Amino acid sequence: MVWNPFKIIPKKFLGIDIGTSTIRIVELSRQGQRKKLENYGEITIGSACTKPFRSSEKSDFLLSSQNISQAILAIIKETKIQTRKAVFSLPDFSTFYTNFELPLMPKKELSAAIQFEARQHIPLLMEEVILDWQVIEKKDFSNSQKTKLKILLLAIPHEVVNQYREISKLCGLELVALEAEAFGLVRSLIKDDDKKKIILVLEIGDRSTTCSLIDNEVLNISHSLDMSGSKLTEAISRGMSIDHKNAEYLKKEYGLKETEEEKNIAKILLPLIDSILNDIEKITQNFYRAEKKEVEKIIIAGGTAQLPGLKNYFEQVLKKEIEIANPFAGIFYPPILEKPLKEIGPGHSIVVGMALRGLET
């Protein structure tokens, strides 16, 4: 082989998402503008342990860093991943979001002003959190005295960040960045055709659901909803007096289908789905009252996005364009993976966003 000193070596990064019941890893590479899926893998409760990887009731992990790192290393070994640079997702339940307005000011003064204002909005001690922020809108009233900056502020507890650092060290990984799940969703799901639109991303996870409103590619607000995929399964289990495993099967197999044989499942699930729709209506109406803008499209992500009949039901009730998340769109991969990636895509929206974040560095 002739050595070519001008050959471009592709940049590679791992995205890692530690969920309550599943840990997912995606390895992406970039050469020029071409992004390629190099590898992916996941491990679920049962194959790694019997308890959740993390708790949605607290701002920390339920299991030790040692348990989580062993699960991550098992994926890396099984998939033969060589890349060591990684971006981890921060769970929304451990990330505090808020937004507020500040008067127009020089950039060098903005950071101090945000630090001061944060104390009025965040119900946590400043010394216990790390702050991250971005300007999400500039309201120009043609008068510098009245022009306002709308700020999105995030606060992450030090203990959460420290545990990710510990997990990375135990896994022999280089922690390049930590990023809130909502930002990963924006990056992986908002494609070129949608960049100017107002989009609501609904990520229905196993133990939590996040509703993120994106205006012109910028995360405007993010809400945690009191519904999840596991609650749907629990409702079927109770309603039909069956165990969790059979309830999970019936949920995935029948969902909201309305044939005679399947009506009982839909009857159990619809009140819970309607509660999600009610929350969406409140969020979109509040946004319209504040900004005089309509949500144009809704993207459903997370493992429950593929629930049979869910997309059609959303379309009927909300009268808006509904799309099932496809984070692998725009990423090169072998054609043989088309079907499996379509099936797992919604559940991999966050982790793909993390890997893409790495490619931007």
Image: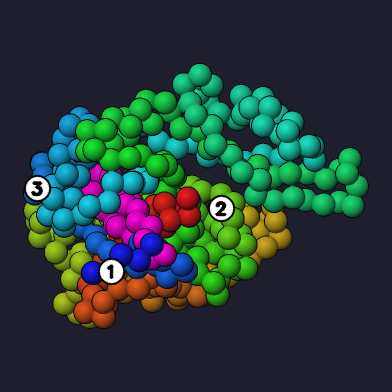
Q: Quadrant of the N terminus?
A: bottom left
Q: Within 10 angstroms of label 3, few (less than 14), some, or many (20 or more) residues?
A: few
Q: Amino acid at mark 1?
A: Val
**Residue at far front of view:** 2
Residue 327 sits above or below residue 90 on the image: below
Residue position marked by numbered label 3 in the rendering:
46
Q: Nearer the viewer, residue 153 or 191?
A: 191
**Could you tell which of marks 1 and 3 lies nearer the N-terminus?**
1
Q: Is residue 293 magenta?
A: no
Q: Are marks 3 and 2 in contact (CB under 8 Å)?
A: no
Residue position marked by numbered label 2 in the rendering:
219
Q: Position of residue 71 (x, y in %)?
A: 16, 43
For the rendered model, the colour scheme is: rainbow
Q: Which residues are magenta?
A: 6-28
User: Which of the labelled discs sits on residue 2, or is there none?
Assistant: 1
Q: Within 10 angstroms of label 2, few (less than 14), some, or many (20 or more) residues?
A: many
In the displayed structure image, the side of residue 6 where residue 307 appears, left or right: left
Quarter of the image holding residue 332?
bottom left
Q: Position of residue 317 (x, y in %)?
A: 47, 71
Q: Are marks 1 and 3 in contact (CB under 8 Å)?
A: no
Q: Position of residue 175 (x, y in %)?
A: 35, 39
Label 1, label 3: how far apart the Cα atoms are:
48 Å
Residue drawn where x is 71% and y is 60% of the image: 292
Q: Amino acid at mark 2?
A: Leu
Q: Nearer the viewer, mark 1 or mark 3?
A: 1
Q: Is residue 21 magenta?
A: yes
Residue drawn where x is 10% and y is 41% of the image: 50
Label 1, label 2: how far apart the Cα atoms are:
48 Å
